[in-house]
Image (cartoon, rainbow, N blue to C red):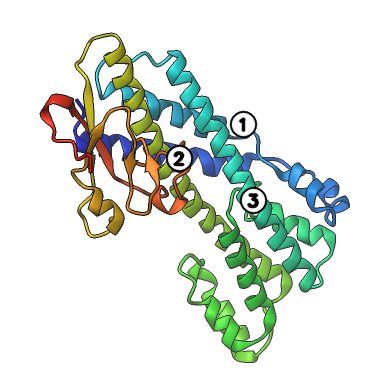
Amino acid sequence: MATRRQKMQELRRLTRVAMAAYVQEIKNKSFVIGDLEKIINDAEALHNELALHGGDLSDTTSAIRDAIAAGGLLEGKFNTSSEAATQFLLQLSSQLVTNINEQQREAIQIITAAGRTLGENPRTIALDLVGRVSRSGVREGGVIGLNAQQAQASANAIYALRSGDPTLMHEYLKYKRRDRRFDATVRRYAAMGKPVPSHMAHTISARYQARLLQTRAETIARTEVMEALEGGAHVSIREQMERGLIEPMAKVWQSTHDGRERDSHAEMDGVAVPFDEPFMLPDGSRVMHPCDSSLGAAAAEIINCRCTVRHVPLSEVQIDNS
């Protein structure tokens, strides 16, 4: 059976692949600015036009597929083309696209509202949504693929840069993911008590948004890959038990002990349950394995979780039935 170290190695490797794929696929998504201008005041039409679909994230999905296979193969014999493995991939892929679009809907609303407050024209708001093409021909910035919190941070950055208020402009200089190459420019205009010129402010915010996209990609990749790894392992163990290749198994929760683990997950360390039963987390959430979202666990218990499961023969563990 797989060791925690093996799982962590696969997690790091496949997270890098999925992260790079997500960033590139978001950048490659094409839009017609003129079409967006026409519907800039129609929230639903705008959401539909900017929505991501499965084909837009095919490389990201491929990385998730590889993670399912890796998780299964680490536990022994595994048929990556089995119905269970295929259904699990479809579930994860559909769930990923749905969650991204739900967050993106809010992000779009935040940026369009910010544009109206600043008195921007429809074309500028459209460009704020999808980014601007640089001299090298690469689209950069925008809120496609970001969540609502990141969109609000982006809107706050634009407000600060365009405000001419030295206090707000210096607040922007505290943003961890800003591009520090523009700091001197921001300080110069803050010292004069003048707003950063519009074209320059949009360039600065585009760089900030590009870095937010990297952060978003890392969170999505790490969470989705871990769910795929653990889910693939679960499918593999189930198939082996059904075929009589291994005896009935139990699952033992393994927490990460590096000072960054959730307190609730640290409490779970060493908890054992029969294979087909869920773990019960301290907040009442139920999960079949770490990062499992199929039973409705809160996002706070799933996102960036690095816990794993160790599978052991049921006869070798003490199950707490209290």
Element on which disc 3 rests? helix
* Mark 1: secondary structure: helix
Question: Seen from this angle, which residue lies furthest bottom?
Answer: 192
Q: Earlier in the sequence, mark 2 or mark 1?
A: 1
Q: Quickly name the residue at label 3.
A: 104
Q: What separation in Å lies between label 2 and label 1 (alpha carbons)?
A: 19 Å
Q: Earlier in the sequence, mark 2 or mark 3?
A: 3
Marks 2/3: CA–CA distance: 20 Å
How dense is the environment of label 3, judged by Cα within 10 Å: few (below 14), some, or many (20 and up)? many
Numbered badge on residue 54? 1
- Does 14 sit above or below residue 239? below
User: 10 Å neighbourhood of mark 1: few (<14), some, or many (≥20)?
Assistant: some
Q: Residue furthest left?
A: 316
Q: Residues within 10 Å of mark 2 (few under 14, many from 20)?
A: many
- Pick the residue in front: 301 or 23: 301
Front-most of 247 and 172?
247
Image quarter where the N terminus lies is: top left
Vertical side of 299 occupied by 122: above or below: below
Q: Nearer the viewer, mark 2 or mark 3?
A: 2
Is there any visible trace of residue 305 in the rendered image?
A: yes
Q: Which residue is mark 2?
A: 293
Amino acid type shown at disc 2:
Ser
